[in-house]
Image (spheres, rainbow, N blue to C red):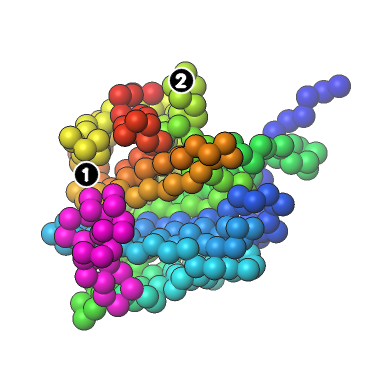
């Protein structure tokens, strides 16, 4: 009997919420980031519907002048997966794969020292919270990258929900313009960035560590580098990504991320290398401009307390003399007080 072939499927309807899988940890997530290269300010926005658990994960993060960060997180209650709209954050599809709208009405905590968010209870208590309004319009400037892996006969791949991070995932670079309004101050944004969407079972503890580096240099030059360790042995490291040149993605077949760390185990910079399927090589340097540490905690079925740290850093990138902006998002499990990937550089 012939082995089934795996293909990747992506339809315009995938921009909209799906019928949830019958698993407790089903997550449908949409994420956007945008960076104004001239002002060196930006932000990211995420809404993850965990409808079978009765809530959504809502995050808004703004990188402001002078190193300030505005941040808000919530777990608003939801009862359906019919829309991406919770906790004041709303994502609307204007034209699938082409135009989307992101708005937020709510509060935001202003941090002069963003690393205080390592202890969120103290950070929210000791820093001012202001009214915040966000209106942003997204316009895709690249093809779509990714989708849902499936067998060519239409049947789904079987995944174990306890160890899954997502069954489907896609990304796109684009332009994002509009305003951040914080208190009486309004910031006009004319930014470039990346968005992604994923759906399926997810626990943040399903991956040992990863380094996710989306970056944009211009409307026709952008990239995303990804290095993932799925288990604690670090024997299986997946290095991948894509590079936008013109209006076409070149697939990365290998990449390296060598990180520089501070005394708290946060990234301050990185030296990267990537190679495409065509054999073209790229050298990229990153400098962290502003970083906020976030966390996710849960208890395993056997009572073990699990702690995941995700550091979200606005980062200035340089490639072949061209300066751009983006994120360096580092996820690590915390074991004995240390991030699991801190001693691993390269791939």
Q: Residue 288 carries which label?
A: 1
Q: Which mark is residue 233?
A: 2
Residue 111 is a magenta residue: yes
Is disc 1 in contact with disc 2, using a CB cutoff of under 8 Å? no
Residue 193 x/y as whole percent: 36, 54
Q: Quadrant of residue 223?
A: top left
Residue 254 x/y as whole percent: 43, 26
- Circle 2 packing at 10 Å, graded few (<14), some (14-19), many (20+), is few
Q: In this view, does 255 lie above or below 190?
A: above
Residue 116 x/y as whole percent: 23, 53
Q: In which quarter of the image is the C terminus?
A: top left
Identity of the residue drawn at 61% across and 46% down:
201
Q: Which residue lies furthest to the left in this view?
A: 66
One can see residue 336 in this view: yes
Q: In this view, does 170 lie above or below 277?
A: below
Q: In which quarter of the image is residue 339?
A: top left
Closer to the observer: label 1 or label 2?
2
Q: In which quarter of the image is residue 13?
A: bottom right
Q: Which mark is residue 92?
A: none
The secondary element bearing badge 2 is classed as loop
Left or right of residue 136, residue 287 in this image: left
Span of residues in magenta: 107-131
- Mark 1–mark 2 Cα distance, whole angstroms, equals 28 Å
The one nearer the camera, 340 or 5, is 340
Residue 165 x/y as whole percent: 55, 42
Q: Considering only order in the chain, which callout, 2 or 1, is on the residue closer to the N terminus?
A: 2
Identity of the residue drawn at 41% across and 42% down:
308
One can see residue 64 in this view: no
Q: Residue furthest front?
A: 303
The secondary element bearing badge 1 is classed as strand
């Amino acid at each position: 009997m012939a082995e089934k072939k795996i293909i990747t499927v992506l339809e315009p309807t995938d921009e909209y919420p799906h019928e949830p899988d019958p698993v407790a940890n089903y997550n449908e997530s949409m994420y956007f980031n945008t960076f104004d290269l001239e002002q060196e300010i930006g932000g990211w926005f995420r809404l993850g519907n965990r409808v079978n658990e009765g809530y959504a994960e809502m995050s808004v993060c703004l990188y402001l002048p002078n190193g300030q960060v505005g941040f808000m997180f919530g777990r608003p209650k939801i009862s359906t997966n019919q829309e991406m709209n919770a906790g004041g954050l709303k994502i609307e599809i204007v034209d699938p794969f082409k135009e989307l709208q992101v708005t937020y009405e709510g509060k935001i905590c202003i941090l002069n020292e963003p690393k205080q968010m390592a202890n969120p209870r103290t950070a929210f208590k000791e820093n001012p919270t202001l009214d915040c309004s966000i209106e942003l319009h997204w316009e895709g400037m690249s093809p779509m990258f990714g989708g849902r892996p499936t067998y060519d006969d239409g049947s789904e791949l079987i995944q174990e929900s306890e160890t899954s991070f997502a069954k489907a995932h896609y990304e796109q670079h684009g332009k994002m313009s509009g305003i951040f309004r914080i208190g009486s101050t309004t910031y006009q944004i004319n930014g470039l960035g990346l968005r992604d969407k994923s759906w399926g079972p997810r626990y943040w503890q399903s991956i040992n560590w990863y380094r996710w580096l989306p970056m944009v240099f211009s409307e026709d030059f952008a990239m995303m580098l990804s290095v993932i360790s799925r288990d604690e042995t670090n024997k299986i490291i997946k290095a991948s990504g894509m590079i936008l040149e013109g209006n076409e993605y070149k697939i990365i077949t290998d990449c390296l991320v060598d990180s520089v760390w501070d005394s708290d185990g946060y990234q301050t910079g990185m030296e990267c290398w990537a190679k495409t399927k065509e054999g073209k090589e790229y050298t990229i340097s990153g400098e962290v401009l502003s970083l906020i540490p976030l966390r996710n905690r849960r208890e395993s079925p056997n009572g073990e307390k699990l702690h995941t740290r995700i550091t979200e850093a606005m980062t200035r990138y340089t490639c072949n003399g061209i300066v751009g902006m983006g994120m360096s998002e580092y996820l690590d499990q915390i074991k004995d007080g240390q991030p699991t990937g801190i001693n691993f550089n390269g791939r």
